[in-house]
């Protein structure tokens, strides 16, 4: 015991002397290895679809453990309520209207779209490569399927995945209503001629979606296992639970929640394998893993759709169910365990990870992200106090602190009503009323004025990018 104590004291004393010498000789602390980052991004997952966010039927032990060991964020938002603009916002740290990846014509990119994420945009992968990161994208991209728009031309060293939504390129000649009203066992993976890419090359078409979640998770584990000394960034964007739903044999028919639950439980299993791979490599103390979703549940698909829990509406809308997402951060050596009820957004990944990797953010680019690093490390209050809810290029609603004002409202996919303009905005206290049931505008005129001031400040500085979602060269 004495020998061990003496060794420990000598070891810590030598580290202290090394730190002091570095400071004296070079004027700086010894270099600490930048953290690794993993973003796991679900597609169309609802706020109430995992256990730790209240789902009573779907078992998600690995995501639950991430939340218990890390941080559960209860007011975390996607950049948009549909796929393409949400992904653009996450990877650039900019509102999609700034990059042109939001449109009032087409809400997302399609297989016949001619454009994609502009080359002028700096992605999180490109940002992290400035500090020598190895970068990989796995899964759904949906920021342009032509070669110049693919991940390997946007800062990622490698890519394996489907370049757009898994329901596109449908080859069965039935109306959408007729097709999607079929029983699940009548919907086959070969009905969707979607390509599976490795790098820029198609390696399988149609992609076998029965085991796509399993293959994505295996690819992520292999990437982790093959890492050397360089820091890495892994962006794993599952195609599911966006319809059509598929699960591999080990999970099919296992969840009490039916096929939708099978899909989520398989995603959760993959998350567990990723955490295990990090621990096996001894990387858990220097890696941050975040799990969230691109937008809320696609509710018209009923049993094949998720749940927004206590929130109103879902995908496609600017009600809370469309953009507030179940979000957990994990990183035992880097994150203080907590439940965070402050506001955060996927727009903040770019700024936060840049700060944690000690990379200056670009000076000539307007970033909408906030630096959440102190909240992650120490549980400090979030620097974000507002959310702008865009639908296409129109600002529909604004959250400031506890309150949210709707200037216009509109349902989506035949649900939640027609478009309405509100001369006096609808106002909800989201802390008291997260379901947006009780309009309190009459009681809080000063809050409406404060939000109006924020909107004026935002619009005065807004430079909108050229629409990239309309069909043009």
Image: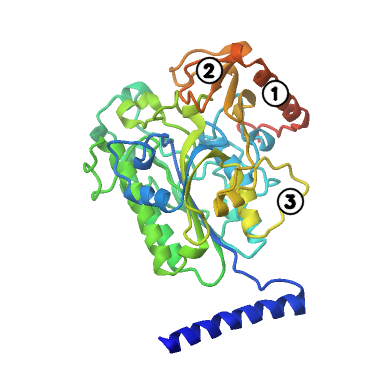
The residue indicated by pointer 3 is: 362
Label 2, residues with CA under 10 Å away: few <14, some 14-19, many ≥20: some
State which tag comes first along the sequence, 3 or 1: 3
In this view, 195 is above or below 257? below
Q: Nearer the viewer, residue 84 or 256?
A: 256
Q: Which residue is drawn at 68% across and 18% down?
A: 446
- Between the residue at mark 1 and the residue at mark 2, the CA separation in whole angstroms equals 24 Å
Tell me, for residue 167, which label it has, or none: none
Q: Which residue is drawn at 60% across and 21% down?
A: 405
How far across and how far down the image is residue 252, in percent? 24, 44
In this view, 212 is above or below 45? below
Is residue 389 in sight in this rendering?
yes
State which tag comes first along the sequence, 1 or 2: 2
Query: Which image quarter holds the N terminus?
Result: bottom left
Q: Residue at x 72, y 32 (%)?
A: 464
Q: Nearer the viewer, residue 70 or 299?
A: 70
The residue indicated by pointer 2 is: 410
């Amino acid at each position: 015991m004495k020998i061990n104590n003496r060794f420990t004291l000598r070891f810590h004393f030598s580290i202290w002397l090394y730190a002091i010498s570095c400071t004296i000789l070079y004027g700086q602390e010894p270099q600490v290895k930048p953290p690794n980052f993993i973003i796991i991004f679900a597609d169309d997952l609802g706020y109430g679809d995992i256990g730790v966010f209240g789902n009573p039927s779907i078992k998600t032990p690995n995501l639950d453990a991430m939340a218990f060991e890390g941080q559960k964020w209860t007011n975390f938002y996607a950049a948009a309520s549909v796929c393409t603009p949400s992904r653009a916002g996450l990877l650039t740290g900019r509102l999609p209207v700034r990059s042109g990846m939001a449109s009032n014509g087409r809400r997302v990119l399609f297989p016949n779209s001619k454009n994609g994420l502009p080359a002028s945009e700096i992605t999180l992968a490109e940002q992290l490569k400035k500090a020598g990161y190895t970068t990989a994208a796995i899964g759904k991209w949906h920021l342009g399927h032509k070669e110049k728009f693919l991940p390997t031309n946007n800062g990622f060293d490698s890519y394996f995945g489907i370049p757009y939504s898994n329901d596109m390129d449908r080859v069965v000649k039935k109306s959408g209503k007729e097709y999607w009203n079929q029983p699940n066992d009548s919907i086959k993976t070969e009905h969707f001629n979607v390509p599976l890419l490795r790098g820029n090359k198609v390696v399988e078409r149609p992609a076998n979606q029965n085991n796509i979640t399993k293959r994505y998770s295996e690819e992520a584990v292999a990437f982790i296992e093959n890492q050397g000394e360089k820091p890495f960034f892994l962006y794993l964007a599952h195609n599911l639970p966006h319809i059509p739903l598929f699960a591999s044999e080990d999970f099919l028919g296992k969840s009490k929640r039916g096929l939708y639950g099978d899909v989520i439980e398989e995603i959760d299993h993959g998350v567990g394998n990723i955490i295990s791979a990090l621990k096996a490599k001894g990387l858990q103390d220097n890696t941050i893993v975040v799990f969230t979703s691109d937008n809320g549940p696609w509710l018209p698909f009923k049993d094949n759709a998720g749940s927004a829990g206590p929130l109103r509406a879902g995908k496609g809308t600017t009600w809370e169910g469309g953009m507030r997402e179940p979000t957990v951060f994990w990183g035992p050596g880097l994150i203080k365990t907590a439940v965070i009820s402050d506001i955060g957004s996927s727009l903040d990944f770019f700024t936060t990870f840049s700060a944690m990797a000690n990379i200056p953010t670009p000076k000539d680019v307007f970033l909408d992200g906030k630096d959440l690093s102190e909240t992650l490390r120490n549980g400090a209050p979030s620097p974000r106090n507002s959310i702008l809810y865009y639908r296409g290029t129109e600002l529909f609603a604004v959250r400031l602190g506890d309150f949210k004002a709707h200037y216009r409202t509109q349902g989506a996919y035949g649900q939640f009503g027609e478009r309405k303009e509100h001369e006096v905005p609808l106002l909800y206290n989201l802390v008291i009323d997260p379901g947006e049931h009780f309009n309190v505008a009459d009681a809080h005129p000063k809050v409406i004025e404060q939000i109006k001031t924020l909107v004026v400040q935002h619009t005065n500085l807004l430079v909108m990018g050229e629409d990239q979602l309309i069909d043009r060269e």
